[in-house]
């Protein structure tokens, strides 16, 4: 019979760090996930081990995944043995990419990676071919329907629904007899997520920068990552809370679209103009930002640039009135229709999110916007503009009134001079 000391010594002997530097695929933290679990859970297809065989609604896609995997191996004349040997060789590395222990045997995990990788590679190849519609076999027309195609794309960038990018890239190269430096798979991947690639203005993505698809979409939005600074100033004050869009508007701040950059981080306040890149708000926007923020919470806590942007918008948008102002100026394109829905979305993105660092541009913008709103002269000028120059007719009437007032003053002055001279 083993004594307690022997049991404890054996436990300590087998103890290893649960999360290493290789870890990049995470379960969303409980406090964040519980607020909107559906935003992090696949709707139609599971990828990787976290959601494998966990949801009955995803079982229908398993046969399609297997069919696509078979089609890709046949397309590239690749033997299953080639893939199996590689996956078995990197199996331990793959396990270290996940934030939680995987309750699958080696054979089970190899099978999951094998089938899911084949499905993704065939899907990317079919999407990347010019005559796409001709490449859907009759028994797979179901996957080409627009609603399902959109749902699959969305499922493929959920943080919990990922495979390590290096595995997909290596399996593609082994299947296509290409050198490891060939970037064709990167191009296929960027093409598949091309809708989001517009944010990167054609910036080339290197495979060494990509950990998985959620990370790729974050990279699309980070064309020029800003520097970071500590969350507190030298004086020990918290980062200033910038006013809302309606408060800024009342203080005389004007909003303009930053047309020189599609990078969402390029927010600039100069003079009394706040320039913000245009953002289209649609059904998938909330899920996209929630997953990028969750990735930053787990993997980039001190380089949380997307979180900076979301926090800044949360400050700007408190009510539907704020949304209407930003929509009117073209900063937001509201495809949700309801301004209240947009406001609620931005107000909910940062709940239970820890924000240890803030980048310099957002810190400086928040500080400058607060200073502008506290300036009484700016408030006075804004009041005058709102009360007397809101429309062209009001402006003309105000100018005319000032001119008449000036003439009256001159006439009075002349009368006073005449009296003095007499």
Image (cartoon, rainbow, N blue to C red):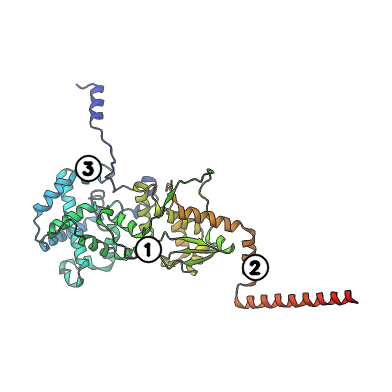
Tag 2 residue: 384
- Crowding near the residue tagged with mark 1, few <14, some 14–19, many ≥20 C-alpha atoms within 10 Å: few
Image position, residue 56 (x, y; %): 24, 53
Closer to the N terminus: mark 1 or mark 2?
A: 1
SS of the residue at dot 3?
loop
Tag 1 residue: 283
Report if residue 379 is visible in the image.
yes
Closer to the N terminus: mark 1 or mark 3?
A: 3
Looking at the image, residue 280 lies above or below residue 225: below
Image position, residue 20 (x, y; %): 28, 41
Q: Nearer the viewer, residue 275 or 422?
A: 422
Tag 3 residue: 103
Could you tell me how far apart the alpha carbons at marks 3 and 2 are, in whole angstroms?
A: 68 Å
Closer to the N terminus: mark 3 or mark 2?
A: 3
Looking at the image, residue 113 lies above or below residue 285: above
Image position, residue 59 (x, y; %): 21, 55
Quadrant in the picture for the C terminus: bottom right
Does the CB distance between marks 1 and 2 fall below 8 Å? no
Q: Nearer the viewer, residue 220 or 142?
A: 220
Horizontally, residue 284 falls left or right of residue 190, namely right
């Amino acid at each position: 019979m083993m004594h307690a000391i022997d049991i404890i010594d054996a436990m300590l002997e087998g103890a290893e760090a649960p999360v290493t530097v290789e870890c990049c695929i995470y379960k969303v933290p409980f406090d964040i996930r519980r607020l909107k679990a559906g935003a992090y859970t696949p709707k139609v297809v599971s990828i990787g081990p976290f959601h494998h065989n966990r949801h009955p609604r995803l079982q229908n896609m398993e046969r399609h995944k297997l069919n696509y995997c078979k089609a890709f191996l046949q397309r590239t004349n690749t033997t299953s043995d080639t893939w199996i040997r590689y996956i078995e060789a990197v199996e331990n590395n793959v396990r270290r990419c996940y934030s939680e222990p995987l309750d699958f045997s080696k054979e089970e995990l190899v099978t999951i990676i094998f089938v899911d990788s084949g499905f993704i590679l065939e899907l990317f190849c079919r999407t990347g071919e010019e005559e796409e519609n001709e490449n859907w076999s009759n028994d797979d027309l179901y996957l080409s329907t627009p609603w399902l195609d959109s749902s699959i794309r969305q499922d493929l960038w959920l943080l919990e629904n990922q495979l390590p990018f290096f595995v997909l890239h290596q399996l593609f190269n082994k299947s296509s007899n290409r050198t490891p430096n060939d970037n064709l798979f990167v191009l296929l991947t960027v093409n598949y997520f091309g809708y989001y690639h517009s944010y990167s203005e054609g910036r080339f993505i290197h495979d060494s920068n990509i950990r998985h698809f959620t990370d790729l979409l974050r990279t699309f939005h980070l064309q020029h990552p800003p520097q970071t600074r500590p969350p507190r100033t030298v004086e020990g004050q918290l980062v200033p809370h910038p006013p809302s869009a309606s408060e800024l508007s009342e203080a005389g701040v004007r909003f303009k679209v930053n047309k020189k950059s599609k990078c969402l981080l390029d927010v600039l306040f100069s003079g009394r103009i706040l320039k913000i890149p245009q953002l289209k708000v649609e059904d998938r926007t909330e899920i996209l930002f929630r997953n990028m923020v969750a990735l930053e919470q787990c993997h980039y806590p001190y380089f949380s640039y997307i979180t900076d942007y979301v926090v800044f918008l949360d400050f700007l948008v408190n009510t539907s009135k704020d949304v209407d102002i930003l929509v009117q100026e073209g900063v937001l394109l509201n495809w949700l229709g309801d301004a209240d829905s947009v406001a609620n979305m931005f107000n909910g993105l940062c709940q239970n999110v820890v924000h240890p660092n803030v980048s310099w541009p957002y810190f400086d913008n928040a500080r400058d916007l607060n200073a502008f709103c506290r300036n009484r002269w700016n408030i006075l000028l804004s009041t005058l503009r709102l009360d007397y120059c809101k429309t062209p007719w009001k402006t003309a009437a105000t100018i005319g009134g000032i001119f008449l007032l000036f003439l009256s003053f001159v006439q009075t002055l002349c009368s006073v001079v005449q009296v003095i001279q007499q």
